[in-house]
Image (cartoon, rainbow, N blue to C red):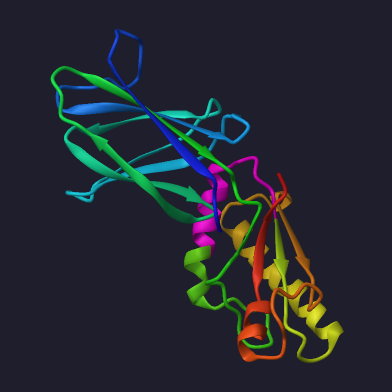
Amino acid sequence: MKYLIASLLLLSVLCSTAQTLEPTETDALINVIVVDKSQKFLEGEKVTFVSQTTKKAYSGVTKADGKFDVLGPEGESYNVLFSAFGENKDYNVLKVPAMEGTVTFEYKLIINPPKMYTLDNVFFDTGKSTLKTESFKELNELAEYMLLKKSLKVEIAGHTDNVGNKDANQKLSEDRAKSVKAYLVKKGIQADRVVAKGYGDTQPVSDNDSDAGKQKNRRTEVRSME
């Protein structure tokens, strides 16, 4: 997956305004704003600042206004991580200098949310729709992301290669998509937020003339319906 992203960092001396969090002599207040490329505020987006020295993480989730506040120690450099569809993407580094007095940073992320991605680590028993246990980690991350993005609806799209009977492949792809949906529902996602659909071998992304190509075609995708 690729994202369009930009960041804007503004530094100012804190004025006396009413805020839930307040900067201190040692901790800077970071006002985080997340918008899409049309400048629409994005709700339910998780941003994490990880200290390069202590590895401690400071994170928050945007509200309806696309904002949240977080405190982070001054004199640190932070890796900025943005969560999307269960992945943490490392975008850039935020340096918070040590300064006298109390300061506030405004940190703005401009993103292009993905419309589709492939569940690379979701696996099934051969020829069946039974999820393997190694699939649970990625599906748990997807469920956690959807719990944050409460308005997000997705399609789970199942695909196969062209080996075997087309009707059997169609049914297998449908059953596998339904298995993923059932797992997400079990994790607390409302059933009407997930559509399970099988495409059989009708939408290959590679040739079916090699094992590597067939493996790419046997996939499960998540497609945003927003």
Q: Residue 211: give x, y in percent of width and height.
A: 63, 90
Name the side, left or right, on which 151 lies relative to 5.
right
| First to last magenta residue range | 139-154
Main secondary structure of the magenta stretch: helix
Q: Please tell me which residue is depicted at 47% across the width and 28% down the height of the picture.
A: 67
- The answer to whether any part of residue 144 appears in the image is yes
Instruction: Looking at the picture, tell me which residue is in the foreground, 164 or 12.
Output: 12
- Quarter of the image that includes the C terminus: top right
How many discs mark residues in the rendered view?
Answer: 0
Instruction: Looking at the picture, tell me which residue is in the foreground, 182 or 145.
Output: 145
Q: Residue 134: give x, y in percent of width and height.
A: 48, 75
Q: Residue furthest right?
A: 167
Q: Residue 108: give x, y in percent of width and height.
A: 44, 31
Q: Is residue 68 magenta?
A: no
Name the side, left or right, on which 51 lies relative to 63.
left
- Quarter of the image that includes the N terminus: bottom right
Q: Residue 196: give x, y in percent of width and height.
A: 74, 62
Q: Is residue 151 magenta?
A: yes
Residue 21, relative to residue 107: is it above or below?
above
Instruction: Looking at the picture, tell me which residue is in the foreground, 68 or 76.
Output: 76
- The answer to whether any part of residue 80 appears in the image is no
Name the side, left or right, on which 135 lies relative to 11.
right
Q: Which quarter of the picture shows residue 123?
A: bottom right
Residue 169, relative to residue 159: is it above or below?
below
Q: Please tell me which residue is depicted at 52% across the width and 29% down the height of the picture.
A: 66
